Image (cartoon, coloured by chain):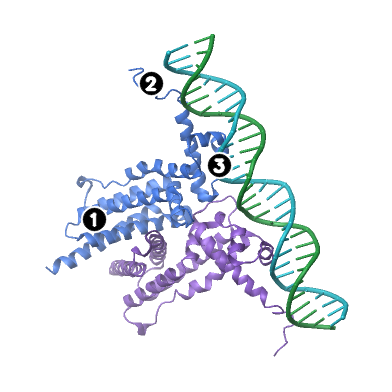
Chain colours: A blue, B purple, C cyan, D green
Amino acid sequence: MTKPQPTRKKRANGVESRQRILDAAVEISGERGYEGTSIAAVSAKCGLPASSIYWHFKDKDDLIAAVIERSFETWLAALELPGEEAGTPLERVTAMAANVAKSLVDEPDFLRLGLMLALERRPVEPRGRTVFLDVREVTRQKITEVITLLIPDMDEDTARTLAVYAVACADGLFIQREITGDGVDLVAMFELHAQLVYEAALRTAARSGNHD
Amino acid sequence: MTKPQPTRKKRANGVESRQRILDAAVEISGERGYEGTSIAAVSAKCGLPASSIYWHFKDKDDLIAAVIERSFETWLAALELPGEEAGTPLERVTAMAANVAKSLVDEPDFLRLGLMLALERRPVEPRGRTVFLDVREVTRQKITEVITLLIPDMDEDTARTLAVYAVACADGLFIQREITGDGVDLVAMFELHAQLVYEAALRTAARSGNHD
DNA sequence: CTTCAATTGGAGTGAACGCTACAGCAATGA
DNA sequence: TCATTGCTGTAGCGTTCACTCCAATTGAAG
């Protein structure tokens, strides 16, 4: 078992360096955006020369995309709906929202960078932007599933609209927190948001259900 | 009346040039953000040399700030609550939201730039960022006034929280539209949003009102 | 016509940008 | 031992950046 894969982990320094570069890059790009992220700054922050960065990543675009890709799993992990034993549907939904909010407070760089990329309109779209939009799309689908799971009466179309609305507002609340800092309780705001959307969904379902 | 101000408008070309520079700058900065806005690009788009830009504006920071300042009034104009003759309170609120949405669809550059500035965290904060945050704060106060006007029972604190929530979600919905393009109806989304917030406000007021 | 201030045009500054070339080095496999 | 591989260090390439200098132009005022 010591040498079945001869082409693996010959030098462990490589993967660690890659992480250090990504750590530096996520921080800087999360603060300054795409154009504001200079290779020199990333190099200075991670302590590795520019040539090392270009050994690990094809170019700046590739680096930014890798930054977002790495945060993907962490992000999805926070997006789980607690099981039925966790309480009423409303409690489960608010708990899920609080979970997401907490992960955003802990590591805001990912979403901050993603939203900046989403807002930018540069002639050649950075790969990181499309990757982020994919993440967002997966998120939207998960929310849609949660809605249809908790409110089976609801038709697919309304559920999707509500999910779009829910995700969009979540982005806005995140930005609000970035602006106001600790002055606003993101967890509380997310819980309020989850409650409003959930109640709106209930009312909508009841309305369309009564017509049959 | 033809020459009471001898030091005014000697050469009309100046003010027009200033407008052309700002027109170019709002477009470019709305697409590429602060760092992505190069003086050379603005110069090329407005047809004036860099020296003219620097004659009208102190530096790049001053230019970006001026871009936001100029959009201030246009923005506030769209933020008016229709009078009582316009219908029920809910109709008035949704009409106001639709109005804002329309103005955002027409001229998205202002808010796109503002949100990018708001998200960025550069060592020396651009003046344009603080100007935008001021605009946002005025907006939030106006929304607060609308809520307390339409629902007098509501206490000031809850009204403010709801206003923060309403403005934040509006930003998020705008971003959603920027991502999805014409695939999402921003006006409809804003109307839905206004309705949800209004109903939530009604329920909150009723709840606290019943306790006395 | 002369004067003068308001603008424009163009050339140019040093610094920072993304990125590359290449030598050097440490560990591995033969 | 020695060539190979994986990664680092240095130096520097061409380009673009924000910004400046200053001569030229233009319309109004005296």
* Secondary structure of residue under mark 1: helix
Instruction: Inspect the image, locate mark 3, and give the three-letter code of the amino acid beneath it.
Output: Ile
Q: Nearer the viewer, residue A77 or B178?
A: B178
Q: In front: mark 1 or mark 3?
A: 3
Co-location on one chain, circles 1 and 3? yes
- Give the residue at x 48% y 39%: A58
Q: Chain of mark 1?
A: A
Instruction: Inspect the image, locate mark 1, and give the three-letter code of the amino acid beneath it.
Output: Ile
What's the distance in space between the residues labelled 2 and 1, CA to CA? 49 Å
What's the distance in space between the residues labelled 3 and 2, CA to CA? 33 Å
Q: Position of residue A124 (x, y in %)?
A: 47, 53
Q: Chain of mark 2?
A: A
Among the two numbered marks 2 and 1 on one chain, the one whose residue lies closer to the N terminus? 2
Co-location on one chain, circles 3 and 2? yes
Pointer 3: residues within 10 angstroms few (<14), some, or many (20+)?
A: some
Among the two numbered marks 3 and 2 on one chain, the one whose residue lies closer to the N terminus? 2
Q: Quadrant of the N terminus of chain A?
A: top left
Name the residue carrying label 1. A147
Q: Position of residue B28 (x, y in %)?
A: 54, 61
Residue A39, label in figure: 3
Q: Examine the rendered structure and indicate whether residue A63 appears above or below residue B49.
A: above
How many callouts does the rendering have?
3
